[in-house]
Image (cartoon, grey):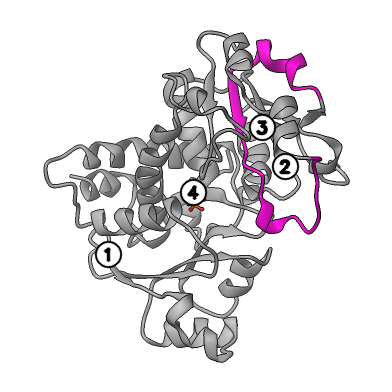
Amino acid sequence: MTATTLRQRGPKHLLSMADLDRDDIEQILNLTESFAEVGERSIPRVPALRGKTIAWLFYEDSTRTRLSFETAAKRLSADTMNFSVGSSSVNKGESLRDTVETIAAMGIDGIVVRHGAAGAPRQVSEWTDASVINAGDGWHQHPTQSLLDLYTARQHLDELDGKHIAIIGDIKHSRVARSNALGFSAMGARVTLVAPPTLLPSTLDGWPVEATHDLDAVLEELDICYLLRMQLERQGQAVVPSLREYHNEYGLTSARADRLPNDALIMHPGPMNRGVEIAGEVADRPAAVITEQVANGVSVRMAVLFLLLGSGLDVVDEQRAIA
Ligand code: CP
Protein backbone atom coordinates (compact mmCIF):
# COMPACT_ATOMS: atom_id res chain seq x y z
CA MET A 1 0.00 0.00 0.00
CA THR A 2 0.98 3.54 -0.32
CA ALA A 3 2.12 5.05 2.98
CA THR A 4 -1.34 6.50 3.61
CA THR A 5 -4.82 5.08 3.27
CA LEU A 6 -7.09 6.13 0.44
CA ARG A 7 -9.11 8.23 2.89
CA GLN A 8 -6.04 9.96 4.24
CA ARG A 9 -4.89 10.81 0.72
CA GLY A 10 -8.29 12.43 0.25
CA PRO A 11 -8.89 11.38 -3.35
CA LYS A 12 -11.20 13.76 -5.14
CA HIS A 13 -12.11 11.75 -8.22
CA LEU A 14 -12.49 8.16 -9.41
CA LEU A 15 -11.52 8.18 -13.07
CA SER A 16 -9.63 4.95 -13.77
CA MET A 17 -8.63 1.69 -12.12
CA ALA A 18 -5.08 2.72 -13.04
CA ASP A 19 -5.32 5.28 -10.21
CA LEU A 20 -5.93 2.59 -7.56
CA ASP A 21 -3.37 0.22 -6.08
CA ARG A 22 -4.19 -3.07 -4.34
CA ASP A 23 -4.57 -1.49 -0.91
CA ASP A 24 -6.87 1.21 -2.28
CA ILE A 25 -9.05 -1.48 -3.84
CA GLU A 26 -9.09 -3.51 -0.63
CA GLN A 27 -10.11 -0.45 1.35
CA ILE A 28 -13.04 0.19 -1.00
CA LEU A 29 -14.11 -3.47 -0.93
CA ASN A 30 -13.92 -3.59 2.88
CA LEU A 31 -16.04 -0.44 3.16
CA THR A 32 -18.46 -1.97 0.65
CA GLU A 33 -19.06 -4.83 3.10
CA SER A 34 -20.28 -2.33 5.70
CA PHE A 35 -22.59 -0.60 3.26
CA ALA A 36 -23.98 -3.96 2.06
CA GLU A 37 -25.20 -4.48 5.62
CA VAL A 38 -27.07 -1.15 5.41
CA GLY A 39 -28.90 -2.45 2.35
CA GLU A 40 -30.27 -5.37 4.35
CA ARG A 41 -31.97 -3.16 6.96
CA SER A 42 -35.73 -2.53 6.97
CA ILE A 43 -34.96 1.14 6.35
CA PRO A 44 -31.81 1.00 4.20
CA ARG A 45 -30.72 4.57 4.68
CA VAL A 46 -27.92 6.30 6.60
CA PRO A 47 -27.20 10.03 6.95
CA ALA A 48 -23.61 9.78 5.71
CA LEU A 49 -23.99 12.24 2.79
CA ARG A 50 -26.84 14.39 4.12
CA GLY A 51 -26.45 17.90 2.68
CA LYS A 52 -24.39 16.75 -0.33
CA THR A 53 -25.69 17.08 -3.89
CA ILE A 54 -24.74 14.71 -6.69
CA ALA A 55 -25.52 15.26 -10.39
CA TRP A 56 -25.82 12.54 -13.05
CA LEU A 57 -24.42 13.35 -16.47
CA PHE A 58 -25.14 10.39 -18.73
CA TYR A 59 -24.45 10.98 -22.42
CA GLU A 60 -24.80 7.24 -23.11
CA ASP A 61 -27.60 4.82 -22.23
CA SER A 62 -27.46 2.95 -18.95
CA THR A 63 -29.72 0.80 -16.82
CA ARG A 64 -27.53 -0.76 -14.12
CA THR A 65 -24.95 1.95 -13.53
CA ARG A 66 -27.34 4.87 -13.39
CA LEU A 67 -29.99 3.17 -11.25
CA SER A 68 -27.45 1.78 -8.81
CA PHE A 69 -25.71 5.14 -8.42
CA GLU A 70 -29.12 6.74 -7.80
CA THR A 71 -30.02 4.07 -5.25
CA ALA A 72 -26.62 4.41 -3.57
CA ALA A 73 -27.03 8.18 -3.28
CA LYS A 74 -30.53 7.81 -1.79
CA ARG A 75 -29.29 5.26 0.75
CA LEU A 76 -26.61 7.77 1.79
CA SER A 77 -29.24 10.57 2.11
CA ALA A 78 -27.60 12.69 -0.60
CA ASP A 79 -29.65 15.06 -2.75
CA THR A 80 -29.51 14.34 -6.46
CA MET A 81 -29.78 16.48 -9.55
CA ASN A 82 -31.20 14.55 -12.46
CA PHE A 83 -30.04 15.47 -15.92
CA SER A 84 -31.26 13.79 -19.04
CA VAL A 85 -29.21 14.54 -22.14
CA GLY A 86 -32.18 13.72 -24.38
CA SER A 87 -34.33 16.48 -22.90
CA SER A 88 -31.59 19.01 -22.14
CA SER A 89 -30.02 21.97 -23.90
CA VAL A 90 -27.36 19.60 -25.26
CA ASN A 91 -29.92 19.19 -28.05
CA LYS A 92 -29.58 22.92 -28.74
CA GLY A 93 -25.83 22.58 -29.19
CA GLU A 94 -24.59 23.26 -25.65
CA SER A 95 -21.07 21.90 -25.20
CA LEU A 96 -19.97 19.43 -22.54
CA ARG A 97 -17.95 22.16 -20.82
CA ASP A 98 -20.83 24.66 -20.75
CA THR A 99 -23.18 21.92 -19.54
CA VAL A 100 -20.81 21.00 -16.70
CA GLU A 101 -20.27 24.61 -15.71
CA THR A 102 -24.03 25.25 -15.76
CA ILE A 103 -24.76 22.30 -13.49
CA ALA A 104 -21.83 23.16 -11.20
CA ALA A 105 -23.08 26.75 -10.86
CA MET A 106 -26.20 25.42 -9.12
CA GLY A 107 -24.03 23.86 -6.41
CA ILE A 108 -22.94 20.24 -6.58
CA ASP A 109 -20.49 18.17 -4.58
CA GLY A 110 -20.20 15.26 -7.00
CA ILE A 111 -20.87 14.50 -10.64
CA VAL A 112 -21.18 11.02 -12.12
CA VAL A 113 -20.27 11.04 -15.81
CA ARG A 114 -20.88 8.55 -18.61
CA HIS A 115 -19.73 9.64 -22.05
CA GLY A 116 -18.87 8.04 -25.36
CA ALA A 117 -15.49 9.78 -25.53
CA ALA A 118 -12.51 8.28 -23.72
CA GLY A 119 -11.14 10.82 -21.26
CA ALA A 120 -14.33 12.90 -20.99
CA PRO A 121 -14.61 12.44 -17.17
CA ARG A 122 -11.00 13.56 -16.73
CA GLN A 123 -11.77 16.67 -18.78
CA VAL A 124 -14.87 17.31 -16.67
CA SER A 125 -12.70 17.15 -13.54
CA GLU A 126 -10.77 20.16 -14.88
CA TRP A 127 -13.95 22.24 -15.27
CA THR A 128 -15.51 21.81 -11.82
CA ASP A 129 -14.53 21.71 -8.17
CA ALA A 130 -16.91 18.79 -7.63
CA SER A 131 -15.71 15.21 -7.31
CA VAL A 132 -15.98 13.39 -10.63
CA ILE A 133 -16.78 9.70 -10.91
CA ASN A 134 -16.32 7.92 -14.22
CA ALA A 135 -19.41 5.82 -14.97
CA GLY A 136 -17.94 4.64 -18.28
CA ASP A 137 -16.04 6.58 -20.96
CA GLY A 138 -15.93 5.12 -24.44
CA TRP A 139 -13.60 2.10 -24.70
CA HIS A 140 -11.47 3.44 -21.88
CA GLN A 141 -12.56 2.75 -18.29
CA HIS A 142 -15.52 1.74 -16.10
CA PRO A 143 -13.94 1.67 -12.63
CA THR A 144 -17.05 1.07 -10.51
CA GLN A 145 -17.95 -1.92 -12.71
CA SER A 146 -14.53 -3.38 -11.98
CA LEU A 147 -14.88 -2.73 -8.25
CA LEU A 148 -18.26 -4.47 -8.08
CA ASP A 149 -16.87 -7.38 -10.09
CA LEU A 150 -13.92 -7.68 -7.70
CA TYR A 151 -16.25 -7.50 -4.72
CA THR A 152 -18.53 -10.22 -6.14
CA ALA A 153 -15.60 -12.47 -7.03
CA ARG A 154 -14.03 -12.02 -3.60
CA GLN A 155 -17.34 -12.91 -1.90
CA HIS A 156 -17.27 -16.30 -3.61
CA LEU A 157 -13.57 -17.06 -3.96
CA ASP A 158 -12.26 -15.34 -0.82
CA GLU A 159 -8.77 -14.43 -2.04
CA LEU A 160 -8.19 -13.48 -5.67
CA ASP A 161 -4.43 -14.12 -5.47
CA GLY A 162 -3.50 -16.76 -8.03
CA LYS A 163 -7.04 -17.15 -9.34
CA HIS A 164 -7.46 -17.35 -13.11
CA ILE A 165 -10.02 -15.17 -14.88
CA ALA A 166 -10.71 -15.31 -18.60
CA ILE A 167 -12.35 -12.20 -20.07
CA ILE A 168 -14.01 -13.37 -23.26
CA GLY A 169 -15.40 -11.47 -26.22
CA ASP A 170 -15.26 -7.97 -27.60
CA ILE A 171 -12.16 -6.86 -25.68
CA LYS A 172 -11.24 -4.24 -28.27
CA HIS A 173 -14.27 -2.03 -27.64
CA SER A 174 -14.67 -2.79 -23.94
CA ARG A 175 -14.02 -0.37 -21.10
CA VAL A 176 -14.98 -3.19 -18.72
CA ALA A 177 -12.13 -5.36 -20.06
CA ARG A 178 -9.64 -2.53 -19.63
CA SER A 179 -10.77 -1.82 -16.06
CA ASN A 180 -10.92 -5.48 -15.07
CA ALA A 181 -7.53 -6.32 -16.57
CA LEU A 182 -6.09 -3.71 -14.20
CA GLY A 183 -8.34 -4.51 -11.24
CA PHE A 184 -8.00 -8.30 -11.20
CA SER A 185 -4.26 -8.22 -11.86
CA ALA A 186 -3.80 -5.64 -9.06
CA MET A 187 -5.50 -8.15 -6.76
CA GLY A 188 -3.06 -10.90 -7.78
CA ALA A 189 -5.24 -12.76 -10.28
CA ARG A 190 -4.02 -14.15 -13.60
CA VAL A 191 -5.96 -12.52 -16.44
CA THR A 192 -6.37 -14.16 -19.85
CA LEU A 193 -8.14 -12.35 -22.68
CA VAL A 194 -9.97 -14.62 -25.11
CA ALA A 195 -11.17 -13.27 -28.45
CA PRO A 196 -10.78 -13.59 -32.20
CA PRO A 197 -7.98 -11.37 -33.61
CA THR A 198 -10.52 -8.80 -34.83
CA LEU A 199 -11.84 -8.27 -31.28
CA LEU A 200 -8.47 -7.80 -29.56
CA PRO A 201 -6.75 -4.39 -29.41
CA SER A 202 -3.99 -3.91 -31.99
CA THR A 203 -1.44 -4.04 -29.17
CA LEU A 204 -1.57 -5.41 -25.64
CA ASP A 205 1.59 -3.53 -24.60
CA GLY A 206 1.10 -2.41 -21.01
CA TRP A 207 -1.83 -4.76 -20.40
CA PRO A 208 -1.03 -7.10 -17.45
CA VAL A 209 -2.58 -10.06 -19.27
CA GLU A 210 -2.11 -13.11 -21.46
CA ALA A 211 -4.20 -13.58 -24.60
CA THR A 212 -5.47 -16.49 -26.66
CA HIS A 213 -7.88 -17.08 -29.54
CA ASP A 214 -8.81 -20.53 -28.20
CA LEU A 215 -11.55 -20.52 -25.54
CA ASP A 216 -11.68 -24.32 -25.35
CA ALA A 217 -8.00 -24.44 -24.37
CA VAL A 218 -8.52 -22.50 -21.12
CA LEU A 219 -12.00 -23.45 -19.90
CA GLU A 220 -10.96 -26.25 -17.56
CA GLU A 221 -8.47 -24.13 -15.61
CA LEU A 222 -10.69 -21.12 -14.92
CA ASP A 223 -11.92 -19.75 -11.61
CA ILE A 224 -13.91 -17.02 -13.36
CA CYS A 225 -15.39 -17.08 -16.82
CA TYR A 226 -16.25 -13.43 -17.62
CA LEU A 227 -18.30 -12.81 -20.76
CA LEU A 228 -18.59 -9.55 -22.68
CA ARG A 229 -21.29 -8.64 -25.15
CA MET A 230 -20.53 -7.61 -28.71
CA GLN A 231 -20.50 -3.82 -28.54
CA LEU A 232 -22.12 -3.28 -31.90
CA GLU A 233 -22.62 0.43 -31.20
CA ARG A 234 -18.82 0.89 -31.17
CA GLN A 235 -17.96 -1.39 -34.09
CA GLY A 236 -17.58 0.56 -37.32
CA GLN A 237 -17.52 -2.58 -39.48
CA ALA A 238 -18.22 -6.29 -39.28
CA VAL A 239 -15.74 -7.92 -36.89
CA VAL A 240 -17.06 -11.48 -37.01
CA PRO A 241 -18.60 -13.37 -39.96
CA SER A 242 -21.93 -13.75 -38.12
CA LEU A 243 -23.23 -13.77 -34.55
CA ARG A 244 -24.10 -17.48 -34.97
CA GLU A 245 -20.48 -18.32 -35.85
CA TYR A 246 -19.26 -16.13 -33.02
CA HIS A 247 -21.51 -18.02 -30.60
CA ASN A 248 -20.17 -21.33 -31.87
CA GLU A 249 -16.51 -20.28 -31.46
CA TYR A 250 -16.59 -17.96 -28.44
CA GLY A 251 -20.01 -18.24 -26.80
CA LEU A 252 -20.36 -19.92 -23.41
CA THR A 253 -22.60 -22.73 -24.63
CA SER A 254 -24.08 -25.34 -22.29
CA ALA A 255 -21.40 -27.82 -23.39
CA ARG A 256 -18.60 -25.35 -22.62
CA ALA A 257 -20.12 -24.38 -19.28
CA ASP A 258 -20.19 -28.08 -18.35
CA ARG A 259 -16.39 -28.15 -18.78
CA LEU A 260 -15.77 -25.36 -16.25
CA PRO A 261 -14.56 -26.46 -12.80
CA ASN A 262 -17.47 -27.03 -10.39
CA ASP A 263 -16.80 -23.92 -8.32
CA ALA A 264 -15.99 -21.58 -11.22
CA LEU A 265 -18.02 -18.37 -11.44
CA ILE A 266 -19.75 -17.15 -14.59
CA MET A 267 -19.82 -13.35 -14.70
CA HIS A 268 -21.13 -10.71 -17.08
CA PRO A 269 -21.32 -6.92 -16.65
CA GLY A 270 -24.66 -6.73 -18.50
CA PRO A 271 -26.52 -6.04 -20.59
CA MET A 272 -26.45 -9.65 -21.86
CA ASN A 273 -27.24 -10.86 -25.33
CA ARG A 274 -28.47 -14.37 -24.59
CA GLY A 275 -27.68 -16.76 -27.39
CA VAL A 276 -24.64 -14.72 -28.52
CA GLU A 277 -21.88 -14.52 -25.88
CA ILE A 278 -23.76 -16.74 -23.41
CA ALA A 279 -26.44 -19.40 -23.83
CA GLY A 280 -29.69 -18.42 -22.13
CA GLU A 281 -29.69 -21.57 -20.01
CA VAL A 282 -26.11 -20.91 -18.82
CA ALA A 283 -26.99 -17.37 -17.69
CA ASP A 284 -29.57 -18.89 -15.33
CA ARG A 285 -27.28 -21.49 -13.72
CA PRO A 286 -26.36 -21.11 -10.02
CA ALA A 287 -22.73 -20.53 -11.06
CA ALA A 288 -23.80 -17.38 -12.91
CA VAL A 289 -23.60 -14.54 -10.39
CA ILE A 290 -24.79 -11.83 -12.77
CA THR A 291 -27.68 -10.57 -10.63
CA GLU A 292 -25.37 -10.60 -7.58
CA GLN A 293 -23.02 -8.32 -9.53
CA VAL A 294 -25.92 -5.90 -10.07
CA ALA A 295 -26.95 -6.00 -6.40
CA ASN A 296 -23.37 -5.45 -5.24
CA GLY A 297 -23.12 -2.44 -7.54
CA VAL A 298 -25.27 -0.45 -5.11
CA SER A 299 -23.03 -1.15 -2.10
CA VAL A 300 -19.81 -0.54 -4.06
CA ARG A 301 -21.14 2.79 -5.31
CA MET A 302 -22.19 3.75 -1.77
CA ALA A 303 -18.59 3.11 -0.68
CA VAL A 304 -17.15 5.13 -3.57
CA LEU A 305 -19.53 8.07 -3.04
CA PHE A 306 -18.80 8.04 0.68
CA LEU A 307 -15.03 7.91 0.21
CA LEU A 308 -15.04 10.80 -2.25
CA LEU A 309 -17.76 13.01 -0.77
CA GLY A 310 -17.68 12.13 2.93
CA SER A 311 -16.75 15.05 5.10
CA GLY A 312 -13.22 14.12 6.02
CA LEU A 313 -14.23 11.60 8.66
CA ASP A 314 -11.53 9.24 9.85
CA VAL A 315 -11.91 5.47 9.90
CA VAL A 316 -13.61 5.51 13.31
CA ASP A 317 -16.15 7.97 12.02
CA GLU A 318 -16.73 5.81 8.97
CA GLN A 319 -18.15 3.24 11.38
CA ARG A 320 -20.36 5.94 12.88
CA ALA A 321 -21.50 7.01 9.41
CA ILE A 322 -23.03 3.60 8.78
CA ALA A 323 -24.50 3.19 12.30
N1 CP B 1 -22.66 -2.78 -16.88
C1 CP B 1 -23.18 -1.59 -17.25
O1 CP B 1 -22.47 -0.58 -17.30
O2 CP B 1 -24.50 -1.61 -17.52
P1 CP B 1 -25.36 -0.34 -17.97
O3 CP B 1 -24.86 0.08 -19.33
O4 CP B 1 -26.79 -0.83 -17.99
O5 CP B 1 -25.14 0.76 -16.98
Cα separation, mark 3 vs mark 2, equals 16 Å
Q: Is residue 130 left or right of residue 247?
A: left
- Indicate the secondary structure of the residue bearing disc 1: loop
Q: Residues within 10 Å of mark 1 (few under 14, many from 20)?
A: many
Give the mark nearest the N terminus, 4 or 3: 4
Q: Are marks 1 and 3 in contact (CB under 8 Å)?
A: no
Residue 234 x/y as whole percent: 70, 57
Q: Do the residues labelled 1 and 4 touch (CB within 8 Å)?
A: no
Q: Are marks 4 and 3 in contact (CB under 8 Å)?
A: no
Amino acid marked by disc 1:
Ala
- Label 3 or label 2, whichever lies nearer to me, is 2
Give the mark nearest the N terminus, 3 or 2: 2
Give the residue displayed 61% in from the left and 53% down from the top: 16
Tell me which corner region of the image, top left, top right, bottom left or bottom right, holds residue 108.
Answer: bottom left
Instruction: Let me know if residue 183 is in the magenta part.
Output: no
Give the residue displayed 50% in from the left and 48% down from the top: 144
Residue that mark 4 sits on: 6
Give the mark nearest the N terminus, 1 or 4: 4
Residue 286 x/y as whole percent: 41, 19
Q: Which mark is residue 185?
A: 3
The yes-or-no answer for disc 1 within 8 Å of ligand 1 is no
* Observer-nearest of 202 and 185: 202
Amino acid marked by disc 2:
Ile
Give the mark nearest the N terminus, 1 or 3: 1
Q: Which region of the structure is painted magenta?
A: 214-241
Give above or below for 301 relative to 92: above
Instruction: Let me know if residue 215 is in the magenta part.
Output: yes
- Label 1 or label 2, whichever lies nearer to me, is 2
Residue that mark 2 sits on: 171
Residue that mark 1 sits on: 78
